[in-house]
Image: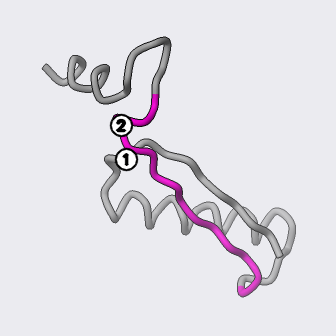
Amino acid sequence: MPLVEIHLLEGRTKEQKRALLEAVTRAVQESIKAPLETIRVWIQEIPLDEFMMAGILASEKYRKDNK
């Protein structure tokens, strides 16, 4: 049973997440010929206040970038 966990910073739309999950599912099915019903794919969203890059919280970085 293929298990695929995707880590993303929060902020994507429901449609974007659905498209990603569907694309990854197809890629797993096509690349290793796994039966569709055995494939598990999920997203773990990370809150912007709980992720730091180069000493800057993601919430601070993206707030600055969007000004």
Q: CA distance from mark 2 to mark 1?
A: 7 Å
The amino acid marked with disc number 1 is Glu
Whether residue 30 appears in magenta in the rendering, the answer is: no
The residue depicted at 37 percent of the width and 27 percent of the height is 58
The amino acid marked with disc number 2 is Leu
Location of residue 22 with respect to 61 vertically, above or below: below
Using a 10 Å C-alpha cutoff, classify the residue at mark 2 as few (fewer than 14 neighbours), some (14 to 19) or many (20 or more). Answer: some
Q: Is residue 12 left or right of residue 25?
A: left
Whether residue 49 appears in magenta in the rendering, the answer is: yes
Report which residue position mark 1 lands on: 10
Which quarter of the figure is the N terminus placed in?
bottom right
- The residue most toward the right is 32
- The residue most toward the top is 54
Q: Are marks 2 and 1 in contact (CB under 8 Å)?
A: yes
The residue depicted at 53 percent of the width and 59 percent of the height is 43
Location of residue 51 with respect to 65 vertically, above or below: below
Front one among 43 and 50: 50
Q: State which mark lies toward you, 2 or 1.
A: 2
Q: Is residue 66 left or right of residue 39?
A: left
Give the x, y percent position of residue 50: 42, 36
Report which residue position mark 2 lands on: 48
Say which element carries label 2.
helix
Q: Quadrant of residue 39?
A: bottom right
Say which element carries label 1.
loop
